[in-house]
Amino acid sequence: MDILTRSTRIHVEEQGDGKMALVFLHYWGGSSRSWDGVVGELSNRYRTITTDHRGWGDSDAPEHGYTIADLANDAQDVIEALNLRRYVLVGHSMGGKVAQLLASRRPNGLEGVVLVAPSPPSPMVLSDEQRAAMAAAYDSRESISWVLDNVLTANLLTPADREQVIVDSLRGAPQAKAAWPNAAMLEDITGDVVSINVPVMVIAGELDQVDRVETLQKELLPRIAAARLHVLPGTGHLSPLEAPFALATGIRAFVGELESQSNTSTRNTPEQVPAAFDAAFNNGDIDSLLGLFSDNATMRMADGETVVSGLEELRRQFSGLLKSGPRIRNQVVFSLVSDDIALVLLDWTVTVTLPDGDHASSRGTATQVMTRGDDGGWKLRISNPLGTARAAEVASV
């Protein structure tokens, strides 16, 4: 199927059925069929949408318009044309950077994002020699084969997948090939991604030489409050082709968590409470946030000095805190349950935008006491974000 966007024609493949849709955005050099192995594992449960970016696959190739914003506009127009009500963005490499920008716009219906070996939101700095070599990487079968064997993969692809990569890379329009290394990968969207307010799963290859795990830990994870990292062992940059089953398994587990959170308002395990807290906090939803606390809850605020009790006082505190639009990410470290009482330790990071446009993050390890109600759901009774610390650790982002 073809969909006319605001400035070009985008080719789209659709499989499966379900209330939740997965929208796949491919890497620089690929096409919608780069996802075939992953989609084959997921389309029996979800509606899957794969697109060809402009200039790649069967989409049109306009002479201009290859910025990250242009690609994000195309994806957003496809989503709106298909009238997707609930969906998850899945972006690989360049497609991951596109997914980040689109998610930062907070489009209706977006419930989560999976970033597969994503290009970080910060500019990728290369020497002139490296950039020229990258721009010529897809010029011939021989150059593509060399990059495939020495840069993109850590495992041999099947002969069919290898030929597919070569054909897709050769087929790309010259302007699309040139746009990424010479312009789009240099774009800085760090100021945008702090606005992402849905859960984000980053899936990286352990042996990725393009978007390395340590690069993502430094340049991406601290900037997206709702992001967490999963590493695929022994995998390079082209995980959709190298490890489609493992990648699909990770995507399925993440989307399953999202469905579980949206299908019930009762948190049946203590570990579900921090995830629900993240969603309510990042959406600025005070009512849902307070619904996670027991009526007589007590909380030590992050300044280390203020201690409040009761829902009304908590509402006053959170109302003031959420005005600045902070983003939080909680990660459970340990939980200990004894009958209807649970002790939960978790690491948290809060990111805020400063008046000058820069960003700062605070982080710490929280101690939480939860109680289980008659309905089987868990709620916060004591919340101590700083644990044993006197103040949160603050760092510039």
Image (spheres, rainbow, N blue to C red):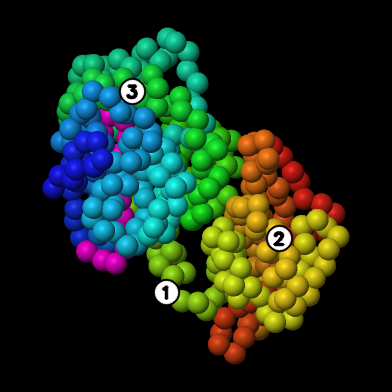
The answer to whether the residues at label 3 and label 1 have Cβ atoms under 8 Å apart is: no
The answer to whether the residues at label 2 and label 1 have Cβ atoms under 8 Å apart is: no
Q: What element carries label 2?
A: helix
CA gap, disc 2 and disc 1: 30 Å
Q: Look at mark 2 in the image and give the residue it sits on.
A: 320
First-in-chain label (3 vs 1): 3
Q: In the displayed structure, does residue 342 sit left or right of residue 92?
A: right
Task: Check disc 2 and give the amino acid type.
Answer: Gly
User: Would residue 188 be counted in the magenta stretch?
Assistant: no
Q: Which residue appears farthest toward the left when viewing the image?
A: 1
Q: Residue 263 carries which label?
A: 1
Range of residues picked out in magenta: 17-33
Task: Check disc 3 and give the amino acid type.
Answer: Ala
Q: Look at mark 3 in the image and give the residue it sits on.
A: 179
Q: Which of 124 and 248 is in front in this view?
A: 124
Tell me, yes or no, if residue 298 can be seen here. no
Q: Is residue 291 above or below residue 118?
A: below
Few, some or many residues within 10 Å of mark 3 (<14, 14–19, 20+):
some
